[in-house]
Image (tube, rainbow, N blue to C red):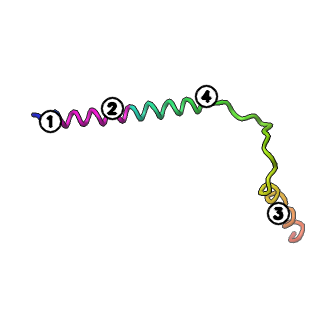
Amino acid sequence: MEAAAKRFQGLMVTMMVVVLIAISSSSAIVAAQEAPAPSPASDASLSIPTLMASFVPLVFGFFFI
């Protein structure tokens, strides 16, 4: 009988951990949904990869088409 009680106690601890993980993950999802969206006019600077991505197709079209 004592083995069954220990098994039940282990099952309850496992279920408690699962419930705590579910609660914490759901609260993180709710917090992410309520976060404000970034403004469309950001202060991001123009970078070299952006320039390369813009000019490479233009150069390719100029020389090969």
Indicate the position of residue 22 as horizontal and vertical percent values.
42, 33
Q: Amino acid at mark 2?
A: Met
| First in sequence: mark 4 vs mark 3 | 4
Instruction: Tell me whether the residue at label 2 lies in contact with that at label 1, contact meaning CB atoms closer than 8 angstroms.
Output: no
Pointer 1 local density, CA inside 10 Å: few below 14, some 14–19, many at least 20: few
Q: Which residue is mark 4?
A: 34
User: What secondary structure is marked by label 1?
Assistant: helix
Closest to the camera, between mark 3 and mark 2, is 2
User: What secondary structure is marked by label 4?
Assistant: loop
Span colored in magenta: 6-19
Q: CA distance from mark 2 to mark 1?
A: 18 Å
| First in sequence: mark 1 vs mark 4 | 1
User: What secondary structure is marked by label 3?
Assistant: helix
Q: Which residue is mark 2?
A: 16
Q: Which residue is mark 1?
A: 4
| First in sequence: mark 3 vs mark 1 | 1
Indicate the position of residue 24 as horizontal and vertical percent values.
46, 32
| First in sequence: mark 2 vs mark 1 | 1
Q: Quadrant of the N terminus?
A: top left
| First in sequence: mark 2 vs mark 4 | 2
User: What secondary structure is marked by label 2?
Assistant: helix
Instruction: Tell me whether the residue at label 4 lies in contact with that at label 3, contact meaning CB atoms closer than 8 angstroms.
Output: no
The numbered disc on residue 56 is 3
Q: Main secondary structure of the magenta part?
A: helix
Asked whether, in this view, residue 31 is left or right of residue 53, the answer is left
Would residue 64 be counted in the magenta stretch?
no
Q: Amino acid at mark 1?
A: Ala
Query: In this picture, is 60 found above or below 22?
Result: below
Q: CA distance from mark 2 to mark 4?
A: 27 Å
Would residue 15 be counted in the magenta stretch?
yes
Look at 16% across and 33% down and name the residue there. 5
